[in-house]
Image (spheres, grey):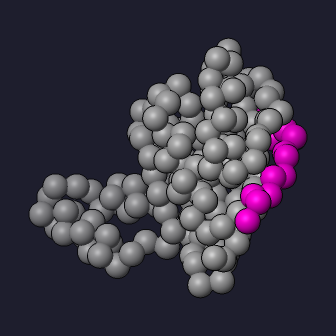
Amino acid sequence: MATTRGVLYVHTVPSALCPHVEWAAGGVLGVPVKLDWTPQPAAQGTYRAELSWQAEAGTAAKLASALRGWQKLRFEVTEEPSNGVEGERYSFTPELGVFHATTGVHGDIMVPEERLKAAMLKAASGEADLTEEVERLLGRPWDDELEPFRYAGDGAPVRWLHQVV
């Protein structure tokens, strides 16, 4: 199995859920996780943390699945491309749910041809605006919602974890 690296960005979480996030991440990574929680200035009463990890390809999907059930949580998980495997990005907000994108070696979002064709058909039939559909395919609504929380994390500590493989 190919190994890769990634980062879990927990943007907002109430203090009561902090241990549960650590437990869920540890369950996916196979090692105990203890995060350095810092107050999230963009959302009073919440906390933020970052976790850099190294594990088998597909770990970002497992982390996103383990965390997406908590409605008070905002997070992103990235996974770098590895030998024969594209990278991935997951974003979650309580209002929008989960966004998933495949990323290339330079971090660009790669939109599959069929999804672009579907967006063009929706626009041609008058169901949707093409610009809005493409922005959704690129994750723009999630980026817009998460951006204030990303900036609030500048300079925050990052911890590295390696999965036992």
How far from the left and from the top, in percent, is residue 135?
42, 57
Q: Residue 131 at x, y = what percent?
A: 36, 60
User: Most extreme residue toward the left, as rendered?
Assistant: 125
Quick check: 25 above or below 162?
above
Q: Does the rendering let one see residue 151?
A: no
Q: Which residue corresponds to the image point at 66% horizontal and 35% vertical from the top-left? A: 23
Q: Is the magenta stretch mostly helix, strand or loop?
A: loop
Residue 125 located left or right of residue 36? left
Quadrant holding the N terminus:
bottom right
- Vertical side of 108 occupied by 19: above or below: above
Q: Nearer the viewer, residue 149 or 81?
A: 81
Nearer the observer, 164 or 77 = 164
| Residue 162 within the magenta-colored segment of the rendering | yes
Q: Can residue 79 be seen in this view?
A: yes
Percent x, y of residue 153 = 77, 37
Q: Is residue 70 left or right of residue 33?
A: left
Residue 53 versus residue 115: which sits nearer the camera? 53
Q: Residue at x 33, y 58 (%)?
A: 133
Task: Provide the residue span drawn in magenta.
Answer: 151-165
Does 128 sit left or right of 59 as displayed?
left
- Looking at the image, which residue is at 87% across and 40% down? 157
- Residue 122: x, y in percent? 19, 62
Residue 85: within the magenta?
A: no
Res 82 quadrant in image = bottom right
